[in-house]
Image (tube, grey):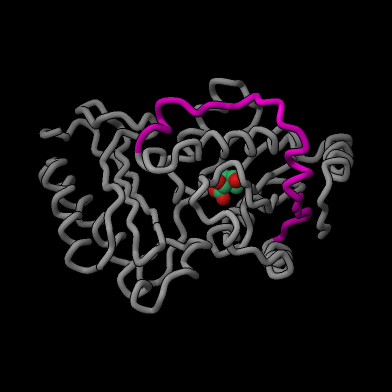
Amino acid sequence: MNVISTIAQLREVVLHAKKQQQTIGLVPTMGYLHDGHLTLAANARQENELVVMSIFVNPTQFGPNEDFESYPRDLARDTKLAQSAGVDIIFAPSVEEMYPHDGGIRIRAGRQAELLCGASRPGHFDGVLQVVAKLFHLVQPDRAYFGQKDAQQVAIIQTMVRDYNFPVELRIVPVVREEDGLAKSSRNIYLSPLDRSQAPAIQQALQLAKRELQETQDVKKALALATKLIEKNTDGKIDYLAILAYPDLTEVTPETEQILLAAAVYIGTTRLIDNVIFSLKGEIAHV
Ligand code: PAF
C-alpha cells in the first residue's frame, strides 16, 4: 500500500490504472478510521481492482465554532487499518494541497441541505460537496463508497451526482454499530463513560419510533415516543428528531416509498447522529 499526499502523485496513480483499464473504488474519509470506514473499504476491495482511500479533514465543511482543530487525526494508525482492509492507495493531502487557491467559486447544496444537520450547520454540505466533487475529478472512480449513517450527506451527494452527471456509481453501506447499537463514529472517542452508557438510547429511540410507525402509521406519536425515551434515558439535548421521505427529505405522504427516521442528539458536548431507513409504502395515515 502507498501513502501519497500530492495531487501530482494521485494523477499518476489514476492515469496508470486507467491505462491498465482497472476499475477504481474511492472511499472518501476524514480519517481516524473505525469499523464503519473499514466496511466501506472492504466493500470497495471486493468490487474494484484499485482501491483509493482519501484521508482529509476538510476545513470547508466545519463551521467557525466546530471541532476542525480538535478533530481526531492519526495517520500512522489509519495507515495500518486501511492496509488490513485491502486499501491500495491512501491519499492524505494537506489543506494547502487541496485548496491552494480561492477563486470564490462555490458549490451550493440545495433545499435538502436546509434541514436536519444543515439547519444547525450552515454551509456544512456546501463544503462536503466541494471536497467530494474535487475527489471525484481527481480519482475518477468507477464507484464511491459512503456510509448510510450520514444519510443526509448521502442524499445530497446523490443529487449532485445525478444533476451534474458525475460518471460514478454511489455505493451506500449500512450503518456499522457497536454491540449495544451505538452507531460507530470517529467522534465517539469524545464520550465520557457516562455519555457512552447513555448514547445507545438514540438508536433505541429510533427503533421505538419505527415500530410505532409500522403499527399505527402515526408520525407525531412516533416522534413523541422517541423524544420521551431520549429525555428519560439521557441527559442529552435533542438537536432534531425527524421523519422524512428519503432521499428527497420532504414530508412523508402516503406515496412515500422510503422513510428516513433521523436524530441528532448532544450527549454531553458530543453531537451524535443516527438514522434508520425503511419502507412503509401507502401506510402513513397521520402526517
Ligand atoms: O463523511 C465524511 O467523512 C466526510 O463528510 C467526507 C465525505 C469524507 C467529505 O469530507
Kindly tell me whether residue 33 is visible in this rendering. yes
Instruction: Name the residue located 10 percent from the left edge and 44 percent from the top edge.
Output: 216
Question: Which residue is found at the position 57% from the left and 60% from the top?
Answer: 71
Which x, y percent locates residue 19?
89, 35
User: For residue 175, which quarter of the picture?
Assistant: bottom left
Q: Residue at left 44%, top 51%?
A: 149
Place of residue 114 in the rendered image (x, y in percent of width and height, measured from the top left)? 39, 32
Front residue of this view, candidates 124 and 216? 124
Q: Is residue 170 magenta?
A: no
Q: Is residue 166 left or right of residue 246?
A: right
Q: Which one is nearer the viewer's eye here, 190 or 273? A: 190
Residue 170: quarter of image = top right
Left or right, 104 with reference to 96: left
| Side (left or right) of 191 relative to 209 | right
The structure residue drawn at horizontal position 61% and vertical position 21%, both measured from the top left corner, is 165
Q: Quadrant of the C terminus?
A: top left
Q: Is residue 146 visible?
A: no
Q: Is residue 91 above or below residue 279?
A: below
Of the 4 image quadrants, the one containing the N terminus is bottom right
Residue 112 among those drawn in magenta: yes
Span colored in magenta: 86-115
Q: Position of residue 266 (x, y in %)?
A: 34, 59
Overall secondary structure of the magenta section: loop
Asked if residue 155 is positioned above or below residue 147 in the image, the reply reads above
| Place of residue 76 in the rendered image (x, y in percent of width and height, measured from the top left) | 74, 69
